[in-house]
Amino acid sequence: MHDLVQDYYGKQLQSSADLKTTACCDFTAMPEWLKPLLSNIHGEVLSRYYGCGLVCPPLLEGCRVLDLGSGSGRDVYALAQMVGASGEVVGVDMTDEQLAIAEEYKDYHAEKFGFNNVRFLKGYIEKLDELDLEAGSFDVVVSNCVINLSPDKDAVLRSVKRLLKPGGEFYFSDVYADRRIPETVKNDPVLYGECLGGALYWNDFIQLAKRQGFADSRLVEDRPLEITDPVLAERCGNIKFFSATYRLFNLDALESDCEDYGQAVIYRGSIKNSPHRFVLDKHHDIQAGKIFPVCGNTWRMLHDSRFAEHFDFIGDFNKHFGIFEGCGVGLPFDSTQFGADGAPCC
């Protein structure tokens, strides 16, 4: 699989125009604040971009960021501007041709930005322990449509967990399926190269993340993918594919479900480019200045991370009220046998 991916992205694809599906094409609405950052990136780097989402989370000034499968370096150079001169972005990729493009324009971007804060390493994202990367040294790890290409996804998430600081986050976009992929699709070299053959069934991903210490995966955004090539569409049959962005926090105290402790947060509106609201994930759009009830996990994600100074926190963990309402998990027992006062009916 490594050889297949290196050949496909190093030799077969010369630009995003050569792709046969929309899986590795980013159609996410571009926020206005990101446009000037991308305009500073060299055209050849941009032309070899094969991402499926935006992996530019907020509040990165001064952070150390690791990009897994950094390719020609588009996301690295965008993130480099976000972390600034006091931060650092490290890109890891296994494809010589892609790394050559990224390295070729390092001086160009250093002059453009006014500082040089990036480096690129050749390596496999399943074998990050073989690279000179210190455990617990990264604030954020990102990846853009790459983990689906890995033959050992457990190893990738295990390394991410090891490399993140406490309270750090893994913020990444990838391709998922509505069911487990059959072997005929997995073993098709074009479908694999197009990020479909290695796509995880979404629920298998959730379990994989839990297995590697990320108890509560948060879906940020998603969109359905279109297989525009009729031959490839026929090979995929009825499988539905999606591009999705998740964020996973390195917080050991997170619980497997959303538990209610009567807590709430108030967003101060102080994060750059987000004066009116902060979107943690698809289900947490937090308006500035308004009390927002949260489960214990969400409280920790904000309180025990780089976001803490931008929120006021209400409550603690001294009193438990059961499952947080609306989180997708409910009381399994029949509660209709209770009266209005909560006492059982005889």
Image: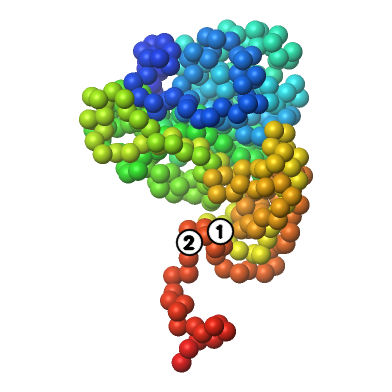
* Residue 306 placement (x, y as % from top left): 71, 41
Name which residue lies at 66% across and 8% down.
Answer: 107
* Residue 151 placement (x, y as % from top left): 39, 32
* Numbered badge on residue 326: none
* Residue 218 placement (x, y as % from top left): 54, 46
Q: Is residue 197 left or right of residue 289?
A: left
Q: Nearer the viewer, residue 178 or 215?
A: 178
Question: Quick check: can you spot residue 98?
Answer: no
Name which residue lies at 56% across and 62% down.
Answer: 324
Residue 131: quadrant of the picture: top right
Q: Which residue is denoted by mark 1 in the rendering?
A: 258
Q: Farthest residue in the bottom direction?
A: 346
Question: What secondary structure is marked by label 2?
Answer: loop
Q: Nearer the viewer, residue 158 or 334?
A: 334
Amino acid under disc 1: Cys
Q: How is the image coloured?
A: rainbow
Q: Nearer the viewer, residue 36 or 105?
A: 36
Question: What secondary structure is marked by label 1?
Answer: loop
Name which residue lies at 38% across and 32% down.
Answer: 225
* Numbered badge on residue 329: 2
Q: Is residue 124 left or right of residue 260?
A: left
Amino acid under disc 2: Val
Q: Is residue 5 left or right of residue 282?
A: left
Q: Nearer the viewer, residue 137 or 335?
A: 335
Question: Quick check: can you spot residue 186?
Answer: yes
Q: Are marks 2 and 1 in contact (CB under 8 Å)?
A: yes
Name which residue lies at 40% across and 28% down.
Answer: 23
- Examine the rendered structure and indicate whether residue 249 appears above or below residue 88: below
* Residue 294 placement (x, y as % from top left): 63, 57
Q: Earlier in the sequence, mark 2 or mark 1?
A: 1
